[in-house]
Amino acid sequence: MSGSVITGWGTALPEKVVTNAEFEARLDTTDEWIVERTGIRERRFGGMTSSLAVEAGAAAVTKAGLEPSDIDLLILSTTTPDKAVPATSSTVHAQLGCSGAAFDLNAACAGYVYALVTADAMLGARIGFERALVIGADTLSVITDMEDRGTAVLFGDGAGAVVLEHHEDAEPLMLASDLGLDGSLLPILYCEHGGYLKMEGKEVFRKAVRVTVDSAAKVLADAELTGDRIALFVPHQANVRIIDAMLQRLGIPPERAALVLDRTGNTSSASIPLALSDAADAGRLSDGDLILFSGFGAGMTWASAVVRWGR
Ligand code: UT7
């Protein structure tokens, strides 16, 4: 028996706080509408994807009691890279001083769960990797049209990271995982090079509830679990009404959800590690607890995993 263990976690948020009142002052919207329809009260804007990723990654490595040079696999989940070439993970790798391999992964807002599953599989394959740094970082403010009330109020910038270490005597990290995509849904959420995000919000909402509930239910069934066995539910933070629908349909007690959406808005790849870190820092996790991750995003992608916390 061998597996990987989450040994560190960390986050980064830009300093600039943007409240709903700031949108209310210049767009045809209200704080009441934004809070009721999304659950978002404020978000952060600023930084670059690489700078936020470096800060979150450094915090996670320190928390794990490691040096960046101990990391031999870096996966950066992002949909807003600094440059077209090279991958932003190259910048992050150099600035942190990591060893080994690094690459970017883009599966939109489901990307962080795709990256966790990939890192765990690469550590488990015993192909030369011992310690992975898995970062989710995005600067969606750069690709959001701040004059469009339908998207401007939704997104924010940030980063979150975890360290995974392989141990010969650990139980497997993942009890079950499910990664998927329906490419025919591309037109409901996309961004052209040099353009802004275009979204059919209502359609994304409807599809998101369906695909995430199906995907999360599948991993629960594969792991032979029911929702009440999940100690912490860490969903993609896009809309509190989507999260509430998932909790209800999966039979997970509402107080088990990790939520940062009210403070961060939708930070895409960063949303799941931000929510996980927030819960871990608040002491909400104990060794052996089962965590359900579930994300969805442009593509349309989806990803769920049941993960064991600690050893
Ligand atoms: O990471 C994945 C990315 N995206 C998502 O997860 C987004 C998923 N979708 C959603 O979260 C929701 O669909 C939204 C929050 C985007 C919109 O909420 P909704 O309850 O689905 O509203 P709607 O799109 O049906 O719009 C209802 C009304 C419309 O006005 P009319 O046509 O009824 O007159 C919109 O124009 O609300 C209007 N509206 C707004 N009103 C005030 C849209 N945005 C705003 C706004 N302030 N910011």
Image (cartoon, rainbow, N blue to C red):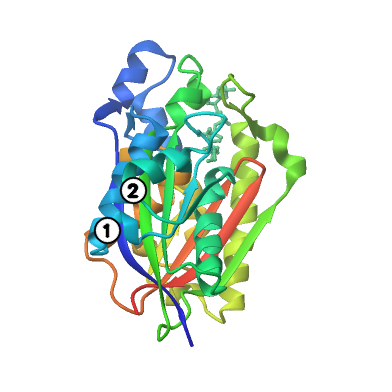
Location of residue 46 in the rendering, given as x and y in whole percent from the top left corner:
33, 27
Label 1 sits on a secondary structure element that is loop
> Residue at (57%, 26%) from the top-left corner?
197
Dot placed on the residue nearer the N-terminal end, 1 or 2: 1
Mark sitting on residue 67: 1
What type is the residue that disc 2 sits on? Gly
With respect to residue 169, does 274 lie above or below? above
Give the mark count: 2
Which quadrant would residue 50 be assigned to in this image?
A: top left
Q: Is residue 48 left or right of residue 198?
A: left
What type is the residue that disc 1 sits on? Glu
For label 2, count other residues whose C-alpha is less than 10 Å away and answer few (under 14), some (14-19) or many (20+). some
* Mark 1 and mark 2 residues within 8 Å of each other at the beta carbon: yes
With respect to residue 223, does 281 lie above or below? above
Q: Seen from this angle, which residue lies furthest top? A: 26
Location of residue 144 in the rendering, given as x and y in whole percent from the top left corner:
49, 23
> Residue at (63%, 44%) from the top-left corner?
206
Q: Quadrant of the C terminus?
A: bottom left
Q: Seen from this angle, which residue lies furthest right? A: 184
How far is mark 1 from mark 2, CA to CA?
9 Å
Kindly tell me whether residue 257 is visible in this rendering: no
With respect to residue 65, does 221 lie above or below? below
Residue in the foreground of this view, choosing between 99 and 297: 99
Location of residue 26 in the rendering, given as x and y in whole percent from the top left corner:
37, 11
The residue wearing badge 2 is: 97
Which quadrant would residue 198 be assigned to in this image?
A: top right
Kindly tell me whether residue 34 is visible in this rendering: yes
For label 1, count other residues whose C-alpha is less than 10 Å away and answer few (under 14), some (14-19) or many (20+). few
